[in-house]
Image (cartoon, coloured by chain):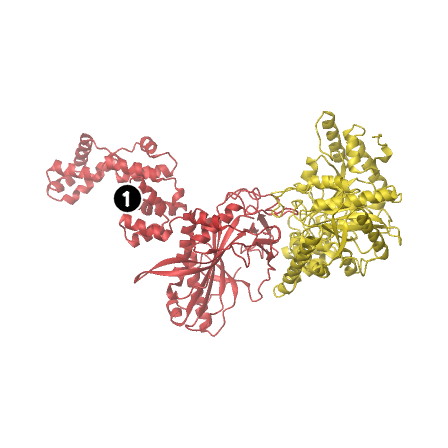
Chain colours: A red, B yellow
C-alpha cells in the first residue's frame, strides 16, 4: 500500500512573511469543434471506446493529417480575446516521445512558432480592502492534438506502474486542444491562490463567451498545470514545481496554496526545491512527486513536414476580431449595474455558475431577485445533491417564467412552485403538465378554507381558546392543521388572516 | 494492328496492350493471366513480388472486360496489370514496406494512389519487394530477402523500388508504382533499363504511402516506355485534399508531351557537378552519346554549374533520418504488426523496445539512431538546422539553372548494377549510388531516368536523368520520349528487348 509520508508544510501566513511566490499557469482546453484537429472524426464526449476513430487519428501507417480550419479560427479568436498578436505565418511541430496513448508516438503541436503570442488577461480578486485587479500576461496560445485515454486496470494507484494491464481509448486522440501559457505571474503575495483561480475562471468564462469550448472541467475539457516557485523578496526566482492536471477551479486554488506551504517548509529547512512534476490529490489537497524533471525530457521538436504552414491573412484576422463577444468581466459589471445588485451578489452567481441562466430567466420577464433566488438557492442545492450541473437539471428559464406568472396570479404558492420544479426535474413534463398531473392548485376558495378552519378549531378546542384569549402565536397550530388538511395547497398567509378574522382577533 | 500473340503479351508495353483491349483483340483477363503465369514461371528466381493476389486480379480483370463488353467507355489504361510497391496501403491486402515489423498488417483503407488506379481500371497484381521502409539502393535491406536484377541475377535491381523495376524488366508486369525519396524510382529504373519518374513534390498524393521522409517522399510511375510512364503519371497525379502538401494546380499534360517529343530549340544543361569523378567510364560513354543525340535532335546543350549539389548527400543523410526517426516511431507493437516480448510481465517500454529490436533491420536502426541524434536538443541547429539551409541553397542552384536552361541532365547513377552483397557492409558506398538523384528530392522538383544503352564494360543498362523545375513534369516526357525514339531508331528496337531470357 502507498504509505505516504506526511509532507512538511509551513503555515501559509508565515510562509508569505518570508517568501514571494511566482506562478505560471498552463491550461489545455478541448475545443468544441464538431470534428477532430486533423481528421473528420466526431469529438463528442462519452462514446463507446474506439468508435470515433479513423486511419488518421489512429496514426495508421500512410495516413496524413489535415488541419481543421475551425480549430484555427477558434484559436485566433481566443488569442484576440486575450489581446495577443497573431502570427502571420507559423508551423506545427512534432513533439516526439513514446507512450501508448499516442498513436504516432509523436504529438502534433506547436513549438517555437505559436499562432498567438504576447497577450494578457485582467482578473479581479476580492480582498478585505475591496476588489483588486491583476494583469496576467500571456506568453502564447497554440494548437495541438489531444492524446488517447489510458485506463490502468489492477494495481493500487490507478497509475501505469503496478497496473496489471491498460486499456486505450483513442476517441480522444486528435481532439483539438489549445494550450495557453502565462508569463510568470509575480506580485500576488498571499493572493496567489485566488489569482490562480480567478485566472482560470476568467479564461473559462471567456472561452464560453467565445463559444469555442463548453469547458467542462469534470469531463477533462479544461486541464490546468500549475507551476509555483518561491524566493525571498528581492532574490532571484526559485526552482519551480509543476503540478499536472489540476482539474477544478477549487483545486487550482488549493494546489497553489499547498505548494506555497510545502516549498516554504523545504526552503526554511535549508533544502532545495526539486524541479519535478507533481500530482494533485483531490481528497487530501496535497501534491506528491511524479517524474523528476532534473533530466529534462528531449522531445526532439522539428517542424511537422506533413502540414503546410498556417498563414492567416490580415483580412481574416480583422473579420474574426469583429466576432469577439463582450469580455466576461465587462459583462458582469454591466449586468451588476443593470440589476442593481452588489459585487458579492454577482460573485455568488458566478460561483454558482448561474450567471447565464439568471440572465436568460430575467429575459423571460422574471424579477431579478426571484431569478437569482431560484438558481442560487433551490436549484443549486438540488444540483449539488444530485451531482449534476445547474443547466443539466432540465429546468429552463421559460419554466421559471411560467411558474412566476402563476404565483403572481395566485394560482401557485412558493411551496407549490417547489413541487412543480421537483416534478420537472423528475421528468414529469413542463410546468402546466406537472401542475395538472400533481393537482397542484392553490385552495383559494374561502368557503373550503373556512370549512377546514372550523374543523381544525373543533379538533383543537384548547388552542382555539388560547387564540381567543389573545395568544395570537398559537394560531400557527391551526394554520398548520389547515395546510395539512388541504395537502399544502392553501396560501398559509390567507388561512391565517381568515382564521383571525373568524375569531375576531387582531393579527 | 496485327493481333497480339498470346506468347508475346507479357512483352508488350501498356499502351499497346490497352489499344489491343480497346480493339477487342485481347481481354484483360488474358493479359492478367499471362502476367500471373509469367510471375509463376520466373519470380522464384527474381523475387520481385512479396504478395500476389491472383484471384482478386483476375476478378478485377473480368469485371473490366464485362464493362467493356457492355459498351462502357473506359480509361486509357483500363485492363492493364500493374505491380504495386509494398509501401502503398491497399484495403485488406498485406502491406509490409519490406519490414518484419509490419508482418501480418492488412490496412483498413486504400491509399489515394490505389484509389486512382482502381478508378482508372488498372489491374493490381500484387505488392513488390523493397528495401525496408524504402531505406536502401539494392533491396538487400528487405526483411524478406533481396530481389534480383533480370539482366543478371547476381546483380541488384536497384532500390528501394527494386521489386517494381525487376517486375518490369522480367516482363512480370507492364506497369509498376514506385516511390522516390532520394532516387528509389530513378536508380532502379537506371540499373534495369526501364523508365522511372519522380514527379514534382506534391504532384501525386502521399496519402496511404507509408512515410519514410515526409518532405522528400514522392510516388511516381515505373514503366518500360516513356509513353507508358506518362499514361500512369496522368492516372495517379492531381490534388488530394487528404494530403496537405498536395499541389492544388492542374497536372502538367505529360501524355501530350510524350506524344509530341519535339525538343528542337530546347535548352538542356549538363550539370557539371554530376558526372565527373566516381562515375564509371561505361556510364560516361553512354551518357555522352545520348547528349550528342540530344544535340542532333535540335536541342541546345550547355554546361551548368550547381555548386551546392556537392553538399546534397550530407544534407540528405541528416534530413531523411531525422524525419524517418519520427515517422517510424509508431511501429511500437502496441496497435498493429509485430509485437515481441509480451510475456505478461514485461512493461510497455520493454515490449516497445523488444518489438523494435527484432522487427527492424540494421539499416533502419542505423538511420533511426542518426535521426534521433540529429534532432536532439543541443545538436538540432548544427545538424537538422544546417541541413535545411543546404536544402535552400540547392533549391536556389536549381532556380538559377532553370533561368538558363529548360531541363538539366546527368547520369542517373554513377555505376551500373553492382553485385548482390558488394556494398551491403559499406553504407557510405551504398549511399553514394544516389548522389545524382538526391538534389531533386531536396529541392522538390521533378526528374526522370531513361535507358540510354548498355555499358560496354559489363553489358548492363545505363540511365540518363532529366531534371525539370517544379510543375515542369511535361518537359521530362518531351525530352525522354525524344531520346527514347532516337535510340530505338538507332538500335532498331527498345533496349528492354535485350534482357536475357530467364
Front one among A315 and A168: A315
Left or right: residue A504 versus residue B165 is: left
Of helix, strand and loop, which one carries label 1? helix
The outermost residue toward the bottom is A270
Q: Position of residue B118 (x, y in %)?
A: 69, 36
Q: Is residue A319 visible?
A: yes
The image quarter containing residue B382 is: bottom right
The outermost residue toward the top is B70
Q: Residues within 10 Å of mark 1 (few under 14, many from 20)?
A: some
In the displayed structure, A16 sits above or below B112; it is below
Left or right: residue B94 versus residue A166 is: right
Q: Position of residue B84 (x, y in %)?
A: 74, 42
Total numbered labels? 1
Front one among B26 and B351: B26
In the displayed structure, A21 sits above or below B468; it is below
Q: Residue at x 38, y 58 (%)?
A: A123
Q: Is residue B148 visible?
A: no
In the displayed structure, A116 sits above or below B49; it is below
Dot 1: chain letter: A
Write down the residue under mark 1. Answer: A370
Front one among B392 and B324: B392
Quadrant of the rendering where the C terminus of chain A is positioned: top left
The image quarter containing residue B88 is: top right
Q: Position of residue B213 (x, y in %)?
A: 67, 53
Q: Residue at x 57, y 64 (%)?
A: A296
Q: Position of residue A43 (x, y in %)?
A: 52, 44
Amino acid at each position: 500500500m502507498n504509505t505516504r509520508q506526511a509532507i512538511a508544510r509551513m503555515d501559509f501566513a508565515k510562509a508569505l512573511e518570508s517568501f514571494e511566490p511566482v506562478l505560471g499557469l498552463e491550461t489545455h482546453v478541448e475545443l468544441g469543434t464538431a470534428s477532430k484537429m486533423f481528421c473528420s472524426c466526431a469529438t463528442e464526449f462519452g462514446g463507446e471506446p474506439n468508435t470515433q476513430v479513423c486511419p488518421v487519428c489512429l496514426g495508421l501507417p500512410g495516413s496524413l493529417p489535415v488541419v481543421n480550419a475551425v480549430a484555427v479560427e477558434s484559436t485566433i479568436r481566443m488569442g484576440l480575446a486575450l489581446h495577443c498578436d497573431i502570427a502571420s505565418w507559423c508551423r506545427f511541430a512534432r513533439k516526439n516521445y513514446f507512450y501508448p496513448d499516442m498513436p504516432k508516438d509523436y504529438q502534433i503541436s506547436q513549438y517555437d512558432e505559436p499562432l498567438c503570442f504576447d497577450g494578457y488577461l485582467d482578473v479581479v480578486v476580492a480582498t478585505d480592502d475591496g476588489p483588486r485587479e491583476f494583469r496576467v500576461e500571456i506568453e502564447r496560445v497554440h494548437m495541438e492534438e489531444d492524446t488517447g485515454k489510458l485506463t490502468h486496470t489492477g494495481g493500487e494507484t490507478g497509475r501505469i506502474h503496478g497496473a496489471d494491464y491498460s486499456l486505450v481509448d483513442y476517441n480522444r486522440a486528435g481532439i483539438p486542444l489549445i494550450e495557453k501559457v502565462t508569463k510568470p505571474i509575480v506580485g500576488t503575495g498571499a493572493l496567489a491562490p485566488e489569482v490562480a483561480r480567478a485566472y482560470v475562471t476568467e479564461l473559462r468564462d471567456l472561452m464560453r463567451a467565445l463559444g469555442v469550448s463548453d469547458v467542462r472541467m469534470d469531463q477533462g475539457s479544461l486541464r490546468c498545470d500549475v507551476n509555483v516557485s518561491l524566493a525571498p523578496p528581492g532574490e532571484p526566482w526559485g526552482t519551480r514545481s509543476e503540478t499536472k492536471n489540476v482539474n477544478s477551479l477549487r483545486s487550482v486554488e488549493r494546489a497553489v496554496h499547498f505548494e506555497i506551504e510545502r516549498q516554504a517548509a523545504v526552503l526554511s529547512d535549508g533544502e532545495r526545491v526539486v524541479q519535478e512534476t507533481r500530482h494533485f490529490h483531490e481528497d487530501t489537497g496535497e501534491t506528491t512527486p511524479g517524474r523528476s524533471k532534473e533530466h529534462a525530457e528531449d522531445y526532439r521538436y522539428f517542424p511537422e513536414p506533413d502540414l503546410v504552414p498556417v498563414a492567416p491573412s490580415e483580412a481574416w484576422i480583422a473579420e474574426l476580431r469583429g466576432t469577439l463577444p463582450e469580455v466576461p468581466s465587462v459583462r458582469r459589471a454591466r449586468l451588476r449595474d443593470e440589476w442593481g445588485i452588489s459585487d458579492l451578489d454577482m460573485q455568488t452567481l458566478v460561483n454558482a455558475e448561474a450567471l447565464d441562466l439568471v440572465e436568460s430567466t430575467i429575459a423571460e420577464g422574471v424579477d431579478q431577485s426571484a431569478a437569482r433566488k431560484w438558481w442560487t438557492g433551490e436549484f443549486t442545492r438540488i444540483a449539488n445533491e444530485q451531482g449534476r450541473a445547474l443547466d443539466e437539471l432540465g429546468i429552463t428559464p421559460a419554466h421559471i417564467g411560467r411558474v412566476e406568472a402563476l404565483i403572481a396570479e395566485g394560482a401557485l404558492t412558493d411551496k407549490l412552485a417547489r413541487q412543480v420544479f421537483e416534478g420537472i426535474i423528475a421528468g414529469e413534463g413542463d410546468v402546466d403538465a406537472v401542475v395538472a398531473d400533481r393537482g397542484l392548485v392553490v385552495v383559494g376558495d374561502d368557503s373550503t378554507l373556512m370549512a377546514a378552519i372550523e374543523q381544525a378549531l373543533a379538533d383543537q378546542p384548547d388552542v382555539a381558546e388560547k387564540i381567543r384569549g389573545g395568544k395570537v402565536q398559537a394560531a400557527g397550530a391551526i394554520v398548520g392543521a389547515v395546510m395539512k388538511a388541504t395537502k399544502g395547497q392553501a396560501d398559509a398567509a390567507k388561512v391565517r388572516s381568515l382564521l383571525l378574522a373568524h375569531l375576531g382577533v387582531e393579527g | 494492328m496485327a493481333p497480339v500473340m498470346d506468347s508475346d503479351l507479357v512483352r508488350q508495353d501498356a499502351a499497346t496492350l490497352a489499344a489491343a483491349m480497346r480493339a477487342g483483340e485481347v481481354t484483360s483477363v488474358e493479359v492478367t493471366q499471362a502476367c500471373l503465369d509469367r510471375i509463376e514461371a520466373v519470380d522464384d528466381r527474381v523475387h520481385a513480388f512479396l504478395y500476389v493476389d491472383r484471384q482478386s486480379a483476375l476478378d478485377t480483370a473480368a469485371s473490366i472486360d464485362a464493362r467493356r463488353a457492355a459498351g462502357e467507355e473506359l480509361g486509357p489504361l483500363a485492363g492493364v496489370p500493374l505491380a504495386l510497391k509494398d509501401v502503398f496501403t491497399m484495403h485488406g491486402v498485406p502491406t509490409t514496406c519490406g519490414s518484419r515489423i509490419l508482418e501480418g498488417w492488412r490496412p483498413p483503407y486504400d491509399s489515394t494512389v490505389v484509389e486512382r488506379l482502381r478508378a482508372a481500371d488498372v489491374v493490381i497484381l500484387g505488392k513488390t519487394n523493397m528495401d525496408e521502409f524504402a531505406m536502401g539502393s539494392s533491396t538487400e535491406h528487405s526483411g524478406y530477402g533481396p530481389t534480383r536484377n533480370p539482366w543478371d541475377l547476381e546483380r541488384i535491381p536497384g532500390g528501394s523500388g527494386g521489386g517494381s523495376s525487376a517486375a518490369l524488366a522480367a516482363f512480370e508486369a507492364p506497369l509498376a508504382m514506385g516511390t522516390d525519396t532520394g532516387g528509389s524510382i530513378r536508380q532502379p529504373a537506371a540499373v534495369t533499363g526501364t523508365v522511372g519518374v519522380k514527379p514534382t513534390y506534391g504532384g501525386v498524393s502521399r496519402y496511404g504511402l507509408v512515410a519514410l521522409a515526409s518532405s522528400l517522399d514522392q510516388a511516381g510511375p515505373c514503366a518500360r516506355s516513356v509513353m507508358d510512364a506518362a499514361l500512369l503519371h496522368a492516372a495517379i497525379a492531381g490534388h488530394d485534399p487528404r494530403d496537405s502538401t498536395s499541389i492544388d494546380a492542374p497536372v502538367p499534360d505529360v501524355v501530350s508531351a510524350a506524344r509530341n517529343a519535339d525538343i528542337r530549340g530546347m535548352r538542356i544543361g549538363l550539370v557539371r557537378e554530376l558526372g565527373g569523378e566516381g562515375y564509371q567510364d561505361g556510364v560516361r560513354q553512354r551518357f555522352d552519346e545520348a547528349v550528342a543525340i540530344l544535340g542532333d535532335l535540335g536541342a541546345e546543350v550547355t554546361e551548368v554549374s550547381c555548386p551546392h549539389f556537392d553538399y546534397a548527400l550530407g544534407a540528405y543523410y541528416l534530413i531523411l533520418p531525422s524525419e524517418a526517426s519520427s515517422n517510424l516511431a509508431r511501429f511500437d507493437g502496441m496497435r498493429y504488426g509485430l509485437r515481441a516480448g509480451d510475456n505478461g510481465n514485461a512493461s510497455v517500454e520493454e515490449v516497445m523496445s523488444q518489438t523494435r529490436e527484432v522487427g527492424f533491420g540494421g539499416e533502419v536502426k542505423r538511420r533511426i539512431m542518426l535521426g534521433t541524434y540529429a534532432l536532439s536538443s543541443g545538436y538540432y541547429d548544427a545538424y537538422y538546422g544546417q541541413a535545411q539551409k543546404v536544402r535552400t541553397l540547392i533549391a536556389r542552384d536549381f532556380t538559377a539553372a532553370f533561368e538558363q536552361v529548360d531541363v538539366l541532365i546527368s547520369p542517373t547513377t554513377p555505376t551500373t548494377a553492382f553485385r548482390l552483397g558488394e556494398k551491403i557492409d559499406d553504407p557510405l558506398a551504398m549511399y553514394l549510388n544516389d548522389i545524382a538523384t538526391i538534389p531533386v528530392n531536396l529541392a522538390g522538383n521533378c526528374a526522370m531516368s531513361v535507358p540510354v544503352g548498355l555499358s560496354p564494360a559489363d553489358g548492363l543498362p545505363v540511365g540518363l536523368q532529366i531534371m525539370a523545375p517544379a510543375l515542369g513534369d511535361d518537359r521530362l516526357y518531351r525530352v525522354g520520349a525524344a531520346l527514347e525514339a532516337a535510340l530505338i531508331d538507332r538500335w532498331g528496337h527498345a533496349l528492354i528487348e535485350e534482357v536475357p531470357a530467364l
